[in-house]
Image (cartoon, coloured by chain):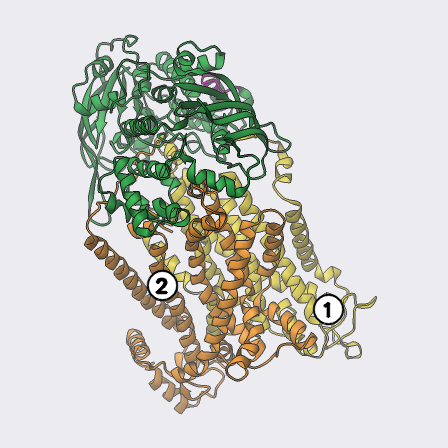
Chain colours: A green, B orange, C yellow
Amino acid sequence: MTQLLTIEDFTLGFRDRPPLLDSVSLHVNDGEAVALVGESGSGKSLTTRAALGLFPGGSEFSGTVAVQGLDTLTASKQRLMELRRGHASMIFQDPRAGINPVRTVGDFLTETLLRFDGLSRAEATERAVKQLEQVGLRRAKELMDQHPHQLSGGMLQRVMIAAALLNSPDLLLCDEPTTALDVTTQAGIVKLLREEQQSRGMGMLFITHDLNLAASLCERVYVLRRGRVVEQGGTQNVFLTPQQDYTRQLVEATPVIDVAGLEAPAAAGVPLLEVAGLSKTYQLPRGDVITALDNAAFTLPEGGSLGVVGESGSGKSTLARLVVALETATEGELTLRGVPRPRRALKASERKVLAKDVQIVFQDPYLSLDPRIPVGNAVADVFRLHQRQGRKQAKVSAAELLGRVGIGPERFDARPRALSGGQRQRVALAKALAARPRLLVLDEATSALDVSVQAQVLELVEELREQLGLTILFVTHDLAVVSRLCSQILVMHQGGIVEQGPTARILEDPGDEYTRNLIASRPRPLWDAEPVTA
Amino acid sequence: MVVMDQAQAPAPPRGPGKRAANRAAAFIAKKVLALIVTLLVASLAVFFSRFLVPGDPARFLLRGRSPKPEALEEITRQFGLDKPAWEQYLNWLGGILHGDWGRSLTYRQDVSDVLLGRLPTTLQLVALAAVFITVLGLFAGILASLNKGFSDRFILITLTAAGAVPPFVAAIALVALFSVGLGWFPSFGSGDGGWDRIWHLTLPALALGITYIAMVARVTRSSMNEQLLREHVEVATSRGLTRGSVVARHVLRNALGPILTVSGVLVAGLLVSSAIIERTFGLSGIGQLLVQSIDRLDFAVVQAIVMVVVAAFVLVNTVVDLIQPLIDPRIAAGTESR
Amino acid sequence: MTLAVQLPQAGLRRYGSLLSPMAWSALAVAAAVVLLSVFAPILAPYDPDYVDLNNVLAGPGAQHLLGTDALGRDLLSRLMYGGRTSLLGPTIVVIGSTVLGLLLGLVAGWSEGWLGKVLGRVFDLLFAFPALLMAMLAIALFGKGLLAPILAMTIAYVPYVARLAQSLVVAERSRPYVQAYRVLGFRTPWVVLGRVLPNLIPTVGAQSTLNFGYVLADLAALSFIGLGVQPPTSDWGAMIEESRGALLGGYILPAFWPALVVVLVVVAVNVIGEELSDRIGGKLS
């Protein structure tokens, strides 16, 4: 077996800074699928781009990065372009950003064929259409004339894959190609990639932060941490019997569905949140009506934990925003602590009272804190408003609470910019808790975090829940995360609730077709008995 | 890793072409309607600005001239000052639509005749300036964007300096250097037709354009720089396209939107600044006419020129708005707004 | 991908690193011009209007540092006094348009209903009247001088500030941190004035700084074509106009000095404004 991609002692960095990649060595053989796993900032994208001779401007590098014997570090521009056109292709993370929005899909697919392969327009179009059909897109001819914004994310990623396969490359580089997609869409893309890789006998280097995904696609894996390869080997060996501490942590932090470990839901207590017939529709300027939430009904008892699971557009965030009164329902009842919610915008005084009942933590740690306000003051402000504390007293309370969520006193005067994503979510949590709410809504609160950080934050939420007797409404797309934290699950699809019940029951014996699909879509390791199916 | 939930727009129904054509027609109709409304409101503002001046309107219009009773009577009759305000406005507007822009007190001519006589010079001046701006501005911007490091910094500093030179200072400097100093170009008059005209208009057009050359270059540079960082450019490169193809097809093409937007502002700016330039170089265009008419208190002419400039601005902006969807199809779909 | 974790820096050092050497020199030039103008009555060597026909168009020398104009008036003194009129106008326009624009922009951005839409339309309409045109119309109505154009340009520059503020507020309003304030029960005026407004100020400040340069140039141009400051009051634009005759006769200096000062000040202001907006842009990314 020959080595298709050989990276040896590859070091890359900027002058006067610690290197971003430090003596990275890896290889991909013909017809082999290899995963490169790491958290954000580990350098996995840099490594992969180097295989195509793409380096960040102003960077310095050394070592060898060879594709079929061509060293991309020293190759001429001409040779590099030939390599990119004919031998190695790359699929990028976000197809919406990766395909020029102002040109048509057909233009995107045919531009290299027309320019460099000397095909006529008709020939190029025919070939592109065939390729689109092969990656599972219907009505390919129509698609050719459409612009990217008219296609869904999953369709666009198939277009991107079609473009990458057009010239029958020997090496396929994939940079988190499913991260921007929904789970069920991801399953389809993963299946397609695996099939193409196997049938064409391509070599594949697959970058991901998701260990499960790596296990479902690749025979071998490299674990990258801060620019160094810390562990490598067969995927099964590395994930089941990791040798390094870091790999072990990563494996442990990766959320899995563990039905056996689920606690039975506590006996239903007094209802805290009751929702009946709740709907939210939006009127679009052109007269169309969008139903974001359709006739939702459920009850959340005091001290309970309910996971709301759904993909994008399922209405789960709308539900969360309705609960915290950021939106007003079009129809239906929402009762919190026995108080019915008026179907109008709340007055300032009502909002202040409500704030003591329910709080929310948002998804994006970079936007959920006021950039100008030091984190200590941000939390103290809430104490001053709700606990009627003086400036000094509020500072003390804030310090105490921040300490509890793991933010030490040395960070009090720091602006959010100076904090990491995980630290910011901790502060956001503290801010919400400072109002001493009974119900805490988490809207994808851990989705933007690295797995290891996510695990820590989840642990913190669990801890706080027990200590403070919080009731939790956890909105997320991730079944595994929700199974860890919630005793009840509610599955949403296209604005409606398709199924709800105890977590163990839903995961083991889903009653709804969509729920079954959602569970089956989770990536399964190659060594698992069942084949990857969608 | 950020999961888009609400932000992800649902894919619009992929209907037959007829629906797209309807949508395009609706888009154009909406823009044209907005144009008409804007022009109407602007005309209201221009017309009723006169009412801000306290006192007798007839005496205001006759400032600087002997307010003889027959003159007052004449002006009252001509402007219909004895009629209610809204009727005066409707008459004025109706007149404009019929090509009757009132009478100039200074020239004792119809305003439309005075304007039409002056318009060609100004249009030629603005057109020549526009050529300089497009060629030099785009060139400098592209050059700066594609050559990082020294040339970028050098061009940027030059642009900062050039952008800070007000047109009238540029005019003086160019005259001092090229007319008085070197004697290459004339400093006065618009010359005869053809090349002589262009020769006479070169310095004025450069003086008029210098600020805008810097502006277009800056916008081009930053718009291209923004595109250069986009992932689709990296994708294009990763597919083996040549640098030239990537820049022309994916960077410059996508960067056109903001450049076009600026050009709307630019046309109005050029027309107004031409007032100063034409005066400095002794060109008899509408810019100089505006200054003279303010000087000679000939309000009917001032009003007409203001309306012309505002209309030009609104018109150019509408054209720009109509072209934008051709450059970026997302604008027509309403998913992207500028 | 964050490469370096930035720790909070104490006090002035943060501002020290905020500006490049170029911005510092721009700031120094601006400060020098402002000080020389403000203290002109104390510092100026001559009466700016003193005519000395025995000493016309003199070159720079010990008596007259920058020389004299066609009427023998001391150019340095006229420049210093001219700065008082030339800088006062832009200052008023920028302060007025910034305050008004911020206020209207906040209202337009925060109100989701018809008010925001109507205000947006008004801004659009105002954009159709370039500042210089608005100023000329005002002069045509109210007569020559500085007052009418200053008021007109204040209004003309309002939409530049207001549009920017509006778009910033709309962006901020939908950000999770603002929504968190709402859920936490903070009152809207507190959130808008106490939290959102300060977050806009750097960006709006950068825009207003740039506006200062444009206004200065426009007002000088008005004086240059004889519609603004009337002689014998000294003003940079008017000084250039007065020197045109001398210029065509080959005497460059009387026009050169005021032109140089105008360009220097506008460059300085632009450099500061751009530096500010670059810094803000870098911060946001």
Residues at marks 1 and 2 touching, judged by CB atoms closer than 8 Å: no
User: Are there few (<14), some (14-19), or many (20+) residues within 10 Å of tag 2?
Assistant: some
Give the percent coordinates (x, y) of residue A50. 51, 33
Residue C121 in the figure: left or right of residue A491:
right
Residue at screen point 51% across, 69% down: B129
Q: Dot 1 falls on which chain? A: C
Asked whether A402 falls inside the magenta stretch, the response is yes
Q: Nearer the viewer, residue B145 or C191?
A: B145
Q: Residue furthest bottom?
A: B70
- Residue under numbered circle 1: C75
**Whether residue C5 can be seen here:** no
Share a chain, discs 1 and 2?
A: no
The CA distance from mark 1 to mark 2 is: 48 Å
Quadrant in which residue A93 is drawn: top left
Give the percent coordinates (x, y) of residue A225. 50, 21
Q: Assign a secondary structure to mark 2.
A: helix
Q: Amino acid at mark 2?
A: Val
Question: Which mark, residue B319?
Answer: 2
Please report the bounds of the magenta region as a residue range: A401-408
